[in-house]
Image (cartoon, rainbow, N blue to C red):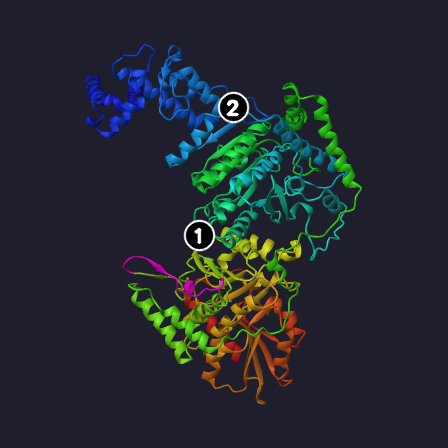
Amino acid sequence: MADDRDNGFLSNFSPEWIESLCQAWQRDAGSVSREWQVFFSGFKLGAATPVGGVPCDERLAQKYANVESLIYRYRYLGHLLACTDPLSPCQLDHPLLTLSAFDLNDADLDTVFDVPGFSLQRATLREIIATLRETYCRELGVEFMHIQDPGERQWLIDRMEPIRNHPSIAPDEKLHILEQLQQAALFESFLHRRFVGQKRFSLEGGEVLIPVLDAIVRACPAAGISEIVMGMSHRGRLNVLAHILGKPYERIFAEFRDITSFGFVGEGDVKYHQGYTNDIAVAGSPLHLTLASNPSHLEAVGPVVEGKCRGRQDRSGADGAQRIMPLLIHGDAAFAGQGSVMETLNMSQLEGYGTGGTIHIVLNNQIGFTTPPKDARSTLYATDVAKMLDCPIFHVQGEAPETAVQAVRLALAYRQAFGRDVVIELICYRRHGHNEGDEPAFTQPLMYRKITDRLPVHRLYAMALAEEGVAPAVLAETEQRIADRLESAFHREPQGGEPSFRADWNQISREYGTVPVETGVPAEILLALAERMAELPPGFTPHDKIGALVRKRLEAVRKGNGIDWGNAETLAYATLVNEGAPVRLSGQDTPRGTFNHRHCVLHDVNSGATHTPLAGIARDGAFFQAFNSHLSEFGVLGFEYGFSLEYPQGLVAWEAQFGDFANGAQVIIDQFISSGETKWNRASGLVLLLPHGYEGQGAEHSSARIERYMQLCAGENMVVANPSTPAQMFHLLRRQVRQAFRKPLVVFTPKSLLRHPRCVSRLDELTTGSFREVLADGVEPASIRRALLCSGKIYYELAEERERRGDSDLALIRIEQLYPFRADLVAEALSRLPEDAVVTWVQEEPENMGAWPWLRTRLASLRSGIRYIGRPEDCCPAVGSHRLHAEQQAEIIRAAFE
């Protein structure tokens, strides 16, 4: 049985038949099929022995097949023998890579083989194995045979096997690598000595990261890269800021002393969360480096970096992806454990989210706080999730800096050649605990016994260079120069302020304002835009219902009334792109709209071709983009937040399929959107469109969790709105771009109102005016005795009931902007009511949810005795029974009037 498996397909044919076929091929290659031509020409059987003249036979063919299998298996499994763990002994052999595993033996070692696709044209089996072990089984293990494209695999083979693992590195470059290692190590020891007990999340044990990043930076000009956007967590961040981005030592030391007088606006964040940007020169070429600010939530910054990078690429033109590159630095436990990693990886080849390939560096210190790998993942490697992308993965020994530098250069070349992600895992260790005050030996005594006895990598590398003949005085001089530089910076005052904003951000005010922004658009422009959006390309046939919708929208604009939500929203986008403001929409089902209301991308029913009318309206460098996202909230919202940072003059919006689905992106909302400006002085105008409304669809499809956003509101950090008319939505979206400042905008959008016959606007409501934070309906008559305060969809149910009852003594006041709360406008509306008028807040949500918990004290400060009517407190936003929902809704309306 074993022999049959090893012989493969050859066991199905007789030796005589193969011999006759081979002879026919030798006489005329065209006389046999293409498959057999490849088979015979590949083996070139006549060259299999120094003697020559050996006829084709099955035994020799099988020997060649076995050698090819051996080569394939080394390429596929050689990484299992690679000596990549500095804390563990190297594995010398593997049962799947022995000679006997291929039906070969020592007698075959000196046989010469000519194997197609191998770096040595003619070589003995001994030489073949030596080359394979040198390439795949030393300080570098490579996983690449899972890549499905044979061209990509061969590209890597051609660059790895001839070069071997230790290509020649010039002496001056070796000294440069040593200096990078020394800088990293001495910086950490200096901080440890000068700022005793302060957290810094040391890079010690993983110092090889610095020469690796430096190698990428130095290779950028030749690769055609002019900008790198980076993201990383706290481990080693200060080191990267100092030695890669060039943040002055003086600034870092001042932060340890808690001196923050650098012109920073806001409350700030801890030093190992801060971002930085700098322009440096590499070999005479400018290179812009950015390290994005990040919270403690590991891997949360990944999608933000991708979005920020995509925004810059889009601004830079068609070759933006080649010139601007994202680079993410991960921890091993986080890369394997955080789901946001997979969400971010999944974007890499998607039209709306790709960035031309990301360099991923996994700094594997073989522990996650106190959790060992066996408890942190179910896979062999921390990087196995990246195999979903068919990208190469390089596993590098953390104490082999030359190998690491060579690996990262190859990774960069691969990214530039194929526009795909690539992963470099630096397998090292963490010399201290999770932070410098932690004792790791409590939980990893054996591991830390090894680490304590181990020399740091800069010492090991200096010893290796000394053995190569580098004078000890040269090595000591470099170290002393670094130490002097650190000491000198410690005694100097920091100079300069925060890095300046890009020119387009300099035009944006840092202060929130309440002055109304005129957002009306002349009727003739709206009509012209509506007509252009109704034009279809020749031969384009939309679905009958969509064609009717397009005509209906145009007719509503022509008539000047009956403009529904989807129409007004689309007109808002049309006017913005027509004025030169870019618009980008993204989310699950966003081009169509979850509730079938948007249809900004049309589909031909015959060819499947698409047509985006709004894209043709854009001018003056603007664009309109609407992308279906993959099924992700965390990753996609993080991406759009990052994108919004690059487009302050445009409208960037993310739409949740249902409003409460945003809870899957709560980290992005809490750590970036609501607090990014006060922590990092980074404003964003990102728009969140969150469908909200109680229509009996159950607990997960009713509430967008208004209460959660209200809890995040303070210091005019963002705008929260619940518009109730199409015209209000039109003005709100336009205001977001036309106002002088930028704040995130959270919009609770309707579902049933999208087609509600009363929820329509007139054209003249779009041509003049602006978004109104408060709408007061019927507060003028002296006969008013009651007033209902509300927000959103429930207004229409209250208005219908008032009309049905004929209640002329009841006013309805809608709060359209929940935050910043316009107390002045609400107070003005309430002041027009008689003093004895009964005022009630009405909402659909339970009492402990919705806007009421946040508004209660604010409304009480304006008028005493305001009552509450709505659902009672509950742990769940809504009931699952449609019948019970209807009963509850009817009771709310009844109670509001009785």
Hey, which quadrant is residue 880 in on the image?
bottom left
Give, as a three-letter code, the residue at label 2. Answer: Arg
Which of the numbered marks, if any, corresponds to residue 631? 1
Label 2 CA crowd tier, 10 Å (few <14, some 14–19, many 20+): many
Residue 668 x, y percent position in the rendering:
56, 53
Q: Report the residue at 22% width, 29% height from top.
A: 33
Residue 631 x, y percent position in the rendering:
44, 52
Residue range highlighted in magenta: 605-620
Q: Is residue 437 above or below residue 535?
A: above
Is residue 608 on the magenta stretch? yes
Spot the residue most to the front. Answer: 284
Spot the residue most to the bottom. Answer: 782
From the viewer's perspective, is 145 left or right of 664? left
- Nearer mark to the viewer, of 1 and 2: 2
Q: Report the residue at 50% width, 49% height from top.
A: 320
Q: Is residue 153 above or below residue 27?
A: below
Is residue 745 on the magenta stretch? no
Mark 1: secondary structure: loop
**Residue 248 in view:** yes
Label 1 CA crowd tier, 10 Å (few <14, some 14–19, many 20+): some
Hey, which quadrant is residue 439 in on the image?
top right
Which of the numbered marks, if any, corresponds to residue 138? 2
Give, as a three-letter code, the residue at label 1. Answer: Leu
From the viewer's perspective, is 185 left or right of 409? right
Q: CA distance from mark 1 to mark 2?
A: 40 Å
